[in-house]
Amino acid sequence: MDPKQFGSSTLPYRHEPTGPLADECLVGANKGRLAVVTGAGRGIGQAIAIALAKSSANVAILDLSVESQEETKLACQKFEGVKVEAYKCDITDVQAVRATFAAIDRAFGPVDILVNNAGVAHGKLAFEETFENFWKAIEINFKGTMLCIYEVLQSMRERKSGCIINMASRAATVDMPGGVSYNSSKAAVVRATASLQEEFEQEGLGQNLHTYCLHPGGVWGAMVTENTTPEVQQQIRPIFKDVPELCGNTIAYLASGRAKELRGHYFDCRQEIERVCSFGYKTLRDYGLYNLGVKFLPGYENEP
Ligand SMILES: NC(=O)c1ccc[n+]([C@@H]2O[C@H](COP(=O)([O-])OP(=O)(O)OC[C@H]3O[C@@H](n4cnc5c(N)ncnc54)[C@H](O)[C@@H]3O)[C@@H](O)[C@H]2O)c1
């Protein structure tokens, strides 16, 4: 990972939740709302569930087993008045996802906030892995995300209200060896998020139905350590500077509707959210900022 290849920001990055993202600013921000968080058993998903509970949302948490979510559930229950339930759900399994969302609806009512966090990164070169392994990652990162979206879409549209936040990654924006399944599935998530928002805008629902996709920063944890050798870990450890709460609190902030200027966009949680929002929805959109795009030689435009 050569920094010269990507450049370094001249503006400071956040590595932990400060300013408007500080815990005390989020209390009550999502009161009375129901949030669903996938992959909540550990890592960033755990921090997201806790941040949403901290912001007074009720939380339905999903992962491959209920037991793996015990710690998250206990941490969320510490917030007064917050209702929490854990569900075993493999997000690639259509029947399981439908049954889980039906159970959530029975227990809590309609979903207000959906956070598609569950994801995997195998970190293998294409010629080192099988197609089946490649496709499994696409299924978790993209199919699973879309499946959960389809479970809430009609209800959010009918109620003209809802927030969907998808976990992308910086990997969606760069071409890197060792990540064909990861990079392409995360890029698909970014494109789907933006296209979905365009549909909401077209229906005049954009202010109330808002979607985002995120890079959480570099968060050291099992996803990285399970897929790398100790030698590689030693080499890459310094670039993982961010606490999972940075992403967790950013999500509670976005879900509360405090940064709708960013709707439909890809956002890197390390950037100052209030500064980026100050440029306004139209400017970000008109200039194609915070989204995927293809650049052409001067003189050529991206004509229909
Ligand atoms: N850690 C980072 O630096 C980083 C950087 C960019 C993006 N991300 C993204 O953030 C998200 C969380 O990353 P993390 O580091 O916390 O990962 P993690 O591996 O620690 O946690 C992922 C969770 O998703 C769950 N999961 C996996 N497959 C599932 C399935 N089929 N159904 C339900 N749950 C499933 C796992 O059991 C696990 O609890 C991922 O989408 C990842 O791609 C992470």
Image (tube, rainbow, N blue to C red):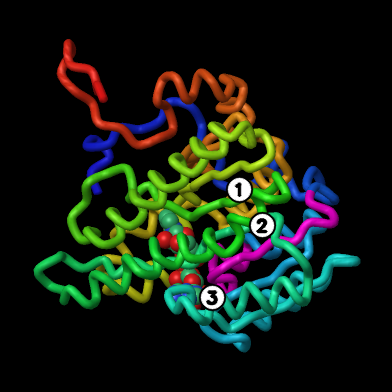
Q: Quadrant of the C terminus?
A: top left
Q: Is residue 303 above or below residue 128?
A: above
Q: How many marks?
A: 3
Q: Amino acid at mark 3?
A: Val
Residue most extreme to the top: 299
Q: Is ligand 1 closer than 8 angstroms to the Cβ of mark 3?
A: no
Q: Is ligand 1 closer than 8 angstroms to the Cβ of mark 1?
A: no
User: Residue at the location (61% across, 78% down)?
Assistant: 100
Mark in the foreground, 2 or 3: 2
Calculate the distance from the C-alpha at mark 1 to the C-alpha at mark 3. Answer: 33 Å
Calculate the distance from the C-alpha at mark 2 to the C-alpha at mark 1. Answer: 34 Å
Between 136 and 219, the residue placed more toward the observer is: 136
Residue segment shown in magenta: 30-47
Q: Position of residue 234 (x, y in %)?
A: 32, 64
Mark in the foreground, 1 or 3: 3
Q: Is residue 8 something that shows in the picture? A: yes
Q: In terms of image quadrants, where is residue 204?
A: top right
Q: Is residue 49 left or right of residue 153?
A: right
Q: Is residue 80 magenta?
A: no
Disc 1 residue crowd, few under 14, some 14–19, many 20+, Cα 10 Å: many
Q: Position of residue 69 (x, y in %)?
A: 63, 80
Q: Position of residue 269 (x, y in %)?
A: 53, 43
Q: Which residue is mark 3?
A: 97
User: Residue at the location (56% across, 19% down)?
Assistant: 279
Q: Amino acid at mark 1?
A: Glu
Q: Amino acid at mark 2?
A: Ser
Q: Earlier in the sequence, mark 2 or mark 1?
A: 1
In the image, which disc is placed on residue 155?
A: 2
Q: Which residue is mark 1?
A: 16
